Amino acid sequence: MIRIREMEAGDVDAAALLEQQIFSRPWSRQGFLDALEMDNTIFLVAEERGTVTGYAGLYAALDEGEITNVAVDGKRRCRGTGALLIRGLKELAEQRGIKRLILEVRVSNDAAIRLYERNGFTKQGIRRDFYELPREDAYIMLCGQ
C-alpha cells in the first residue's frame, strides 16, 4: 500500500538518491534540507513498506504554486504513485489558499504529460531550451485559475 505524507528531514537521503537516479541535473541533499526549512514549500513523499518510493515538491508565492519535481522510483512506476503525489500536492495547496499550480515538463516526457493532464493540468506554452543535458524544450502546464 502506498502512503503519501509530508517529507521530513529523515527522508532527504532517499529523495536525493531518487533525484540522482532520475534527473540529469539533480538537487543535492542540502537543497532538499534547505527547501524543507522554508515556510513557502510543500514536499511530499510516497512510502511503501517503510521505503520512500517517490516524492514531489512545490514552492508557493501568494496564491500560486510551482511544482518543482515529481519523481517515482523507476521500478515502481505505473502503480499510481505519481497521481497520488500530485493529488496530495493539490489538496495541501488548496488548504493553503493556492488557487493555481504551474509546472514545466520535457516535451518528450509523454508519461508525465499524460499524468499531469489526467490531474487537471493543461499546456499553456513552451519554454525553448529550458532543459540541459540533454537540451530540450519544456511545456508550461497550468492547473487552476
Image (tube, rainbow, N blue to C red):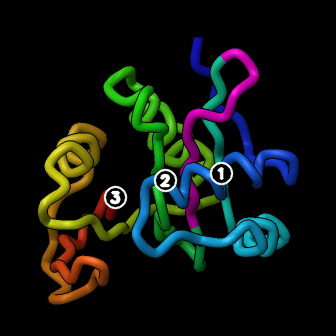
User: Residue 134 — which label?
Assistant: none
Q: Residue at x 49, y 47 (%)?
A: 90
Q: Position of residue 120 (x, y in %)?
A: 27, 46
Could you say which quadrant of the image residue 145 lies in? bottom left
Is disc 1 surrounded by few (<14), some (14 to 19) or many (20+) residues within 10 Å?
many
Q: Residue at x 46, y 29 (%)?
A: 81
- Distance, label 1 to label 3, CA atoms, is 28 Å
The residue segment tinted magenta is 49-58
Sequence-earlier tag: 1 or 3: 1
Front disc: 1 or 3: 1
Q: Which residue is mark 1?
A: 15
Q: Position of residue 97 (x, y in %)?
A: 60, 60
- Tag 3's secondary structure? strand
- For the residues labelled 1 and 2, say whether their Cβ atoms are less than 8 Å apart: no
Most distant residue in the top direction: 1
Q: Position of residue 129 (x, y in %)?
A: 19, 88
Is disc 2 surrounded by few (<14), some (14 to 19) or many (20+) residues within 10 Å?
few
Sequence-earlier tag: 1 or 2: 1
- Distance, label 1 to label 2, CA atoms, is 10 Å
- Tag 2's secondary structure? helix
User: Residue 144 — which label?
Assistant: 3
Q: Is residue 12 left or right of residue 113?
A: right
Q: Is residue 91 left or right of residue 9?
A: left
Say if 27 sits above or below 119 in the image: below
Sequence-earlier tag: 2 or 3: 2
Taking the magenta stretch, the answer to whether it contains residue 53 is yes
- Name the residue type under label 2: Gln
Q: Residue at x 73, y 71 (%)?
A: 35
- Name the residue type under label 1: Ala
User: Residue 21 — which label?
Assistant: 2
Is disc 3 surrounded by few (<14), some (14 to 19) or many (20+) residues within 10 Å?
few
Say if 111 sits above or below 103 in the image: above
